Amino acid sequence: MKYLLLWGLIFILAIFIYRVATEIQESAQFKTISLSDLITDSDNIEEVKIKGNKIEGKFKNGELFRSYGIADWGFINELIKKGIKVNVFPEEKASIWKDILIAWVPTLVIIFLFFSLVRGIERGNARAITFTKAKAKMFIPKKENKVTFSSVAGIDEVKEEVMDILEYLKNPNKFREMGVRPPKGVIFIGPPGTGKTLVAKAIANEADVPFFYEVGSSFIELFVGVGSARIRDLFDRARKHSPCIIFIDEIDAVGRSRGAGIGGGHDEREQTLNQLLVELDGIESRGEPIVVIAATNRPDILDPALLRAGRFDKKVYFPLPDLKGRIEIFKVHAKRFKVDENVDFEKVARMVPGFSGADIENMLNEAAIMAVRAKKSKIDEETLMKARDKIIMGAERKNFYITEEQKKRIAYHEAGHTMVAKLYGKEQVEKVSIIPRGKALGVTLQIPKEDIYIMDKDYILKKITILLSGRATEEIIFGSESTGAVDDIEKSTEIAKKMIYEWGMSSLGPIAFKTKDEYVFLGKEVARHEEISEEIAKKLDNEVISIISLCYEKAKSIILENIEKLHNLAKALLEKETLLEKEIEEILTTA
Ligand code: ADP
Ligand code: ZN
């Protein structure tokens, strides 16, 4: 907003200067004479223009004149008789408006700008604030309720890695005396919700220094120069509060390779990035104890200049927590929520493979809400399970109306998934349900016993078969296809494509044929379009098709062989709507 105001003022000033200049120039050309002089001098007039009470014209010697007064008809007649060209115009009403506009518009613009500035600040309105939000959020460590290393769980390696930052901020002089090159740019790499902000905050609090928070995208503005000014402003403030930490979340918004993207570079981003580099380099020369931490999930697209030695040269990886990590994160957060002491955290952590720390926190929060609604005094395992289901699959939609016909189709579809998963995939099926949730009409919930880091080809093919068995069941039972399998089909096709194009599982051998990807090559971010000959492309596509059809046939044959079991499973589902693993196993073994 500061800048809009400035530009507005410059614009208005420019108009004024222009107006005044033309005015001066114009009047300099005219000689103002009195009306009586004009009448006596009328013989020398060549041409006259009359606009209201303004008389302008040219003498025969070329001189321009201007006179004010009412030119009556007698005067005009006399001029005409003398053979002088006379033009009479109506009084310029418009000129009054013009005058008013010129006099008032600037004032109004200034008033408007001022009010929108005030309103923007008051409302925190996002649009107005893109201009006002020049200031990053600053957090000063507080004694009570503060995030410390003890609030961070399950990532001990990370804590160890950032220990030197903490030591440095606590005691910068000791570092310098020892000749240690101070840590100044650190990059935190990991998926969202893995605790990057949390750790940065914890370091600030442990070191008892202020913490500046800004999101990378807030440096990206439409106007060139705004982003870099904001970077400068941020570092200026930080310098006043050093030692301190500057945390820039989602650095990739600014830090993308320069000269990348469609239509060449992005001027604004380039300037902003350059400013960031200048400020980073400045820290070193001034020897200020400022540590800049940047977070990203896409280190591959960052400009190499950012990662050069002396800039963001320290990388800390934040993985998704493993089982042990998840247990610890549950325990840390359980202190804040009222969790029943009988809850088995290992069991709960096993239910949520792939959950980040933020997901776990969210799940506990959801469970707490559910416990309050159910008038429970504490969060028990059952509530935690419900919260997990809501997060993974969406909220139950109990009042969602569905015809018996459609319900039957959904029941068979899910029963198909479940049966093939159990009999052929030897997988766990935690539960199967035909209660609509989120946008899904039914779900088969498969949670692996262990975290999966690597998959073999056999496992992948079985996965595809399980995914396709919903559609296969519909075809067998109803003799027709439906749109209910859209997600399954999308997912299985994607996996099959990955097998062939990325994982080197085609008959052509261990070759990656990734067709499109962004990556950094020699400092340039490029979209790679792998040169694949038409002949090979055809072959690869055929392999994808054959994987899918093979798996689909497999699914159908399993279903046909076990059709009685399928009927029983579907019947039970229609009756109970949700079946747990034990019930599923019972039905599958007795039939
Ligand atoms: P990121 O910055 O990586 O996207 P955050 O640090 O903002 O993630 O994490 C969001 C929230 O998730 C934190 O406030 C915290 O409640 C929880 N969280 C994430 N990781 C952890 C962890 N390792 N230990 C405890 N809580 C965590
Ligand atoms: Zn399905």
Image: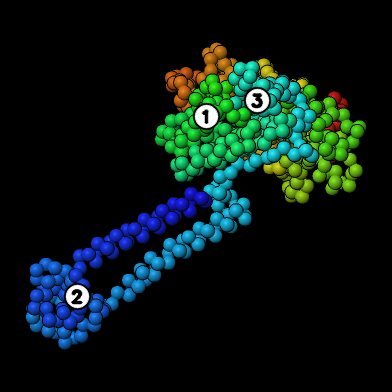
Q: Amino acid at mark 2?
A: Ile
Residue in front for this viewpoint, 439 or 335: 335
* SS state under label 2: loop
Of all residues shown, which one is farthest toward the top?
509
Alpha-carbon span between mark 3 and mark 2: 81 Å
Q: Residue at x 87, y 29 (%)?
A: 344
Indicate the position of residue 364 as horizontal and vertical percent values: 80, 37
Alpha-carbon span between mark 2 and mark 1: 67 Å
Name the residue beneath numbered marker 2: 33
Scheme of colours in the image? rainbow
Q: Which mark is residue 460?
A: none
Residue in front for this viewpoint, 166 or 302: 166
Alpha-carbon span between mark 1 and mark 3: 17 Å
Of all residues shown, which one is farthest toward the bottom?
74
Question: Callout 3: 10 Å neighbours few (<14), some, many (20+)?
Answer: some
Residue in front for this viewpoint, 428 or 126: 126
Residue 535 lies in quadrant: top left
Name the residue beneath numbered marker 1: 282
Name the residue beneath numbered marker 3: 172
User: Does any portion of residue 450 appear in the rendered image?
Assistant: yes
Q: Residue at x 27, y 63 (%)?
A: 24
Q: Amino acid at mark 3?
A: Pro
* SS state under label 1: helix
Q: Amino acid at mark 1?
A: Gly
- Could you tell me if the residues under marks 3 and 2 are in contact, i.e. CB atoms within 8 Å? no
Q: Is residue 37 left or right of residue 120?
A: left
Q: Residue at x 29, y 74 (%)?
A: 92
